[in-house]
Image (tube, rainbow, N blue to C red):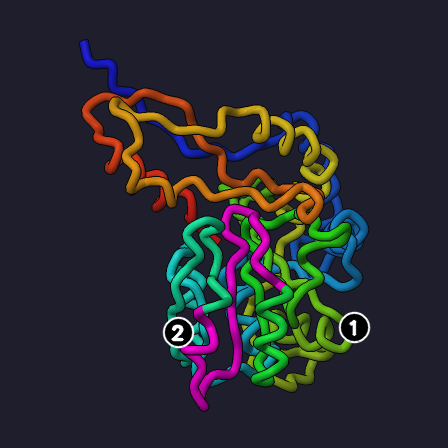
């Protein structure tokens, strides 16, 4: 008999269905399904309070949020980014007619290596888009210093970094904008969803207009926008999920943090185990990457490395 068994890198964390039914009943009773309804407004406020930020805009998913973030800052030309990310990071640039310029990662953190950024800057470079890979903070100080020196924008793909605090403040406060994914694969999910964290009310207003077709009122359109709004269903789930997030993160933290295959990990796979920042720097983690301790049949350690790495960067 075969001992093969499907192994999940992660599975969505969901509340008991009975806890969600009252939220659904309110939506059915009100007939307000989208367009910034009461759950949407409440969820934005709760997220600001929980994450320690002032301005947040909810989106239908993280990919549309990335596309809109670039639009909001009027980014053009070339953008320096990481090759080690889900495809949505680079695709958001291409959808805006922007050329992605890939710079290699630090082999220990798996984040964009600041020491390699300056060599990739050209007269066409307008921004840097790093990713906080697996919730490990990028070297935000070094990246910001380069951006300031060359007058570049910084947009963080913070898909893995929900709830991460760095030097006693939200990691999401760094850069010009930070973009979250609330996709089903994330520790904190709303089925599908995303968000942009803005530094000020003016930027949030522009983003909110762009995600609603560019409307400023019922009849006036001021910019070519997109439909990026989060529905009341997703916002309601988010409110309920936020109450449970501490338990979900503790559950991820308690799982084994090493992966094993039928043979030992080769020395060449050492890059797959990123080092953690010092505890004095990183004051909380998202525990987004849920590694597995599992012996699989008919699979070499190189195979396990490839599959785990590909799956672990999935979906915005």
Assign the N terminus to one quadrant of the image: top left
Query: Residue lying farthest bottom?
Result: 123
The residue closer to the viewer here, 88 or 298, is 298
Number of dots carrying numbers: 2
Q: Does residue 303 appear to the left or right of 108 in the view shown?
A: left
- 101 w.r.t. 301: above or below: below
Q: Which residue is mark 1?
A: 201
- 123 w.r.t. 3: above or below: below
Q: Where are the magenta residues, as a range?
A: 116-140
Quick check: can you spot residue 253? yes
The residue closer to the viewer here, 265 or 73, is 265
Q: Earlier in the sequence, mark 1 or mark 2?
A: 2
Element class at badge 2:
strand
- Return the x and y of residue 296 as percentages of the image width and height: 28, 22
Residue 18: image quadrant is top right
Element class at badge 1:
helix
Foreground label between 1 and 2: 2
- Return the x and y of residue 23 as percentages of the image width and height: 72, 38
Task: Characterize the local packing of mark 1: few (<14), some (14-19) or many (20 or more) Cα atoms within 10 angstroms.
Answer: few
Quick check: can you spot residue 38? no
- Return the x and y of residue 285 as percentages of the image width and height: 63, 42
- Return the x and y of residue 134 as percentages of the image width and height: 51, 46
Q: Which residue is mark 2?
A: 100
The residue closer to the viewer here, 253 or 120, is 120
Which residue is found at the position 60% from the left and 50% from the top? Answer: 161
Q: Is residue 76 magenta?
A: no
Q: Does residue 260 appear to the left or right of 113 in the view shown?
A: left
Which residue is found at the position 67% from the left and 50% from the top? Answer: 232
């Amino acid at each position: 008999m075969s001992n093969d068994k499907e192994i999940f890198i992660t599975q969505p964390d969901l509340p008991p269905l009975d806890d969600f039914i009252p939220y659904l009943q309110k939506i059915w009773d009100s007939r307000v399904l989208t367009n910034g309804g009461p759950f949407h407004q409440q969820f934005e406020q709760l997220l600001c309070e929980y994450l320690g930020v002032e301005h947040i805009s909810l989106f239908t998913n993280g990919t549309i949020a990335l596309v809109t973030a670039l639009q909001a800052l009027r980014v053009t030309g070339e953008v320096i980014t990481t090759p080690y990310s889900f495809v949505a990071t680079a695709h958001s640039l291409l959808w805006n007619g922007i050329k992605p310029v890939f710079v290699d990662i630090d082999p220990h953190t798996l984040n964009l290596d600041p020491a390699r950024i300056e060599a990739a800057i050209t007269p066409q470079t307008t921004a840097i888009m790093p990713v906080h890979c697996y919730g490990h903070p990028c070297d935000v100080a070094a990246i910001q210093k380069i951006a300031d020196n060359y007058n570049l924008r910084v947009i963080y793909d913070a898909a893995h970094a929900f709830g991460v605090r760095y030097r006693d403040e939200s990691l999401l406060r760094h850069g010009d904008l930070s973009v979250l994914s609330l996709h089903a694969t994330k520790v904190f999910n709303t089925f599908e969803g995303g968000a942009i964290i803005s530094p000020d009310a003016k930027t949030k207003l522009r983003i909110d207009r762009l995600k609603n077709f560019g409307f400023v009122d019922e009849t006036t359109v001021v910019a070519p926008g997109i439909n990026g709004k989060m529905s009341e269903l997703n916002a309601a789930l988010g409110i309920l999920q936020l109450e449970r997030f501490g338990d979900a993160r503790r559950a991820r933290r308690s799982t084994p943090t090493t992966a094993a295959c039928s043979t030992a990990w080769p020395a060449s796979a050492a890059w797959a185990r990123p080092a953690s920042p010092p505890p004095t720097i990183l004051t909380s983690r998202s525990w987004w990457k849920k590694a597995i301790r599992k012996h699989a049949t008919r699979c070499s350690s190189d195979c396990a490395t490839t599959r785990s790495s590909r799956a672990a960067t999935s979906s915005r």
